[in-house]
Image: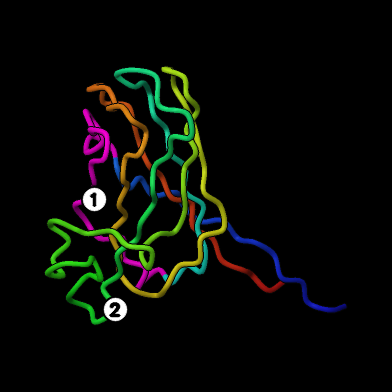
Amino acid sequence: MANEILWKPQTAATLLTTELNNMADAAIVIDAADYDNATNKFRWANFFLYCTDFDAAPDSGAYFDLHLFYKLDGTNYGDGESGDAADPTPTSSSLHGLFQIEAVDAAQYQQVLGVPLLPYAFRSCLVNRTGTDLTAVDTHWLKMYPYNEEVQ
């Protein structure tokens, strides 16, 4: 019998939570801690965003950018500025997906699927392009569901 290659999901990681409270339109929020994929070596991930509520209904065509800033040299992030991830400048090279947001002032779940991951530590980043702010409640989050292949 030939081997089969199956997907093997791993434990979910919560990347952003309270950092999203009161996130203003056009604001950039970056994770305060690395996700150490240099150790974990996951090949892919699905990202899941939950927005509890907005200050007003988002604009038509609203979205959040998903950026990943890697530490390719083990020290500096490719963040478009000084490499410390304190004040990143997201670019098309760090963009890994868009969370499309409906133009309704209500809770929304959105996903970005099949994002390839590199074997380096990284920080996740969201850019709010909804035309409105997120509310101050402590229930917004961004989670990552990494996975690999498994040969059986």
Residue 54: horizontal and vertical position, in percent? 34, 22
Label placed on residue 121? none
Tell me the SS state at disc 2: loop
**What are the residue bounds of the magenta stretch?**
17-40
Left or right, residue 46 beside residue 58:
right
Q: Image height check: is 53 above or below 81?
A: above
| Residue 70 percent across, percent down from the top left | 30, 69
Q: Magenta stretch: residue 28 in it?
A: yes
Q: How is the image coloured?
A: rainbow
Q: Is residue 5 above or below residue 135?
A: below
Task: Give the residue furthest to the front.
Answer: 60
User: In this picture, is 37 found above or below 51?
Assistant: below
- Reading the chain from its start, which is encountered first: label 1 or label 2? 1
Please give the count of numbered marks on the rendered protein.
2
Q: Residue at x 39, y 19 (%)?
A: 57
Amino acid carrying mark 2 in the image: Leu
Left or right of residue 91, residue 96 in this image: right
Give the quadrant of residue 36. Answer: bottom left
Q: Residues within 10 Å of mark 2 (few under 14, many from 20)?
A: some
Q: Report the residue marked by disc 1.
A: 30
x, y percentage for residue 122?
Answer: 30, 65
Task: Check the picture and name the quadrant holding the N terminus.
Answer: bottom right
Camera-side residue of 56 and 12: 56
Q: Is residue 22 on the magenta stretch?
A: yes
152 left or right of 136? right
Local packing at callout 1 (Cα closer than 10 Å; few below 14, some 14-19, many 20+) is many
Residue 53: image quadrant is top left
Residue ID at (37%, 68%): 93
Q: Nearer the viewer, residue 67 or 89?
A: 89
Q: CA distance from mark 1 to mark 2?
A: 17 Å
**Disc 2 designates what residue?**
72
Quadrant of the drawing holding the C terminus: bottom right
